[in-house]
Amino acid sequence: MMRSPYVVGAVIVASTTLLVLLNKRARSKAKKLARQLWDGDEANEALKAELDAVSAVKKTWKTRLVVLGQQLEKIEQDIAEAEVSFATSSSPRSPLSATDTSAKSPASAAAASSYYHFDSKGNKFKNKWDSYDVDEELKALDNDEVSGQSRPIDKSGAVAKQRAALQKELGAAHGDLWKAQDALDSIVLGPANDEGDEDDAALRASRKALVMDLASVMAASDALQSRFKALRDYPKP
């Protein structure tokens, strides 16, 4: 018995409709597609924009913290070098040291004096200038300079400015990263489902990766903060 084409068509349409209704995944996709065609995917676009904003903050400070770390290392090095230099540098040379003459005889006191003295008979006492070797003293001064005993350079002013600028930037990094963390925490995607929504899955993957990356950058920021707080004062000359 031949069936009417209309009957066959109706059966096919009814079967297809039934399969679609029974298939939750297909039904979910159909609903979402209909919403996107009618209203546009506003919800997902808003979530993507929020994630992109957090990602931008993370990328900015991830790069900047590397530079700040190098600046901090330079300050640490300058302080350490100054401590060594000021500790090992000698005081300015005094080739003609003062001599205590309180308990010495007049002749001895005269010999230690910078002036010429004569006894009652007109004889000149020996003076310390008589035995002073100018060439030897100049040679000793040259040796001091060659051996690095000259007075070290005082970088306290420059280091103080660098510390102030670095402290300001580290504070900004701390504040911006915590704001980004709060923003990321506020992005709620809802419970996961088994309907195979590819856009939702992509958003979840992006958020998960961003959580890990942001935590890494925040840890780097905290490490620099700890090192900065541990900085010693620049030594006084």
Image: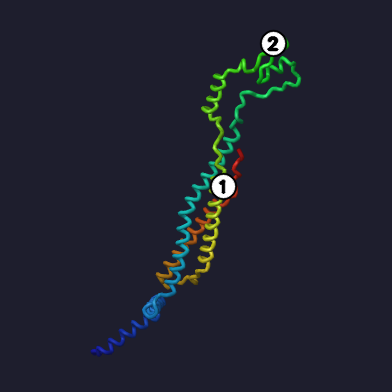
Tell me the mark number nearer the camera, choosing from 2 and 1: 2
Location of residue 139 with respect to 224 vertically, above or below: above
Q: Identify which residue, 179 or 99, lies in the foreground.
A: 99
For residue 17, side relative to residue 170 (left or right): left
Q: Residues within 10 Å of mark 1 (few under 14, many from 20)?
A: some
Residue drawn where x is 59% and y is 46% of the image: 231
Q: Amino acid at mark 2?
A: Gly
Image coordinates of residue 41 in percent, x first then y, are 40, 75
- For label 2, count other residues whose C-alpha is less than 10 Å away and answer few (under 14), some (14-19) or many (20+): few
Say whether residue 43 is left or right of residue 141: left
Residue that label 2 marks: 122
Question: What residue appears at the point 28 percent right and 86 percent down from the top-left corner?
Answer: 9
SS assignment at label 2:
loop
Q: Residue at x 41, y 70 (%)?
A: 199
117 and 33: which is toward the camera: 117
Display coloring: rainbow
- Which mark, residue 133? none
Is the C-beta separation of discs 2 and 1 under 8 Å? Answer: no
The picture quadrant where one finds residue 138 is: top right
Q: How far across and how far down the image is residue 127, in percent?
A: 65, 16
Does dot 1 land on a helix, a strand or a loop? Answer: helix
Locate the C terminus and report the quarter of the image it occupies.
top right
State the residue lying farthest toward the top. Answer: 121
Q: Nearer the viewer, residue 38 or 176?
A: 176
Q: Which mark is residue 160?
A: 1
Tell me which amino acid carries mark 1: Ala
| Residue 23 seen in the current view | no
Q: Nearer the viewer, residue 2 or 162?
A: 162
Residue at figure coordinates x 56%, y 33% from the top left:
151
Q: How many marks?
A: 2
Mark 2 to mark 1 CA distance (whole Å):
63 Å
Nearer the N terminus, badge 2 or badge 1? 2
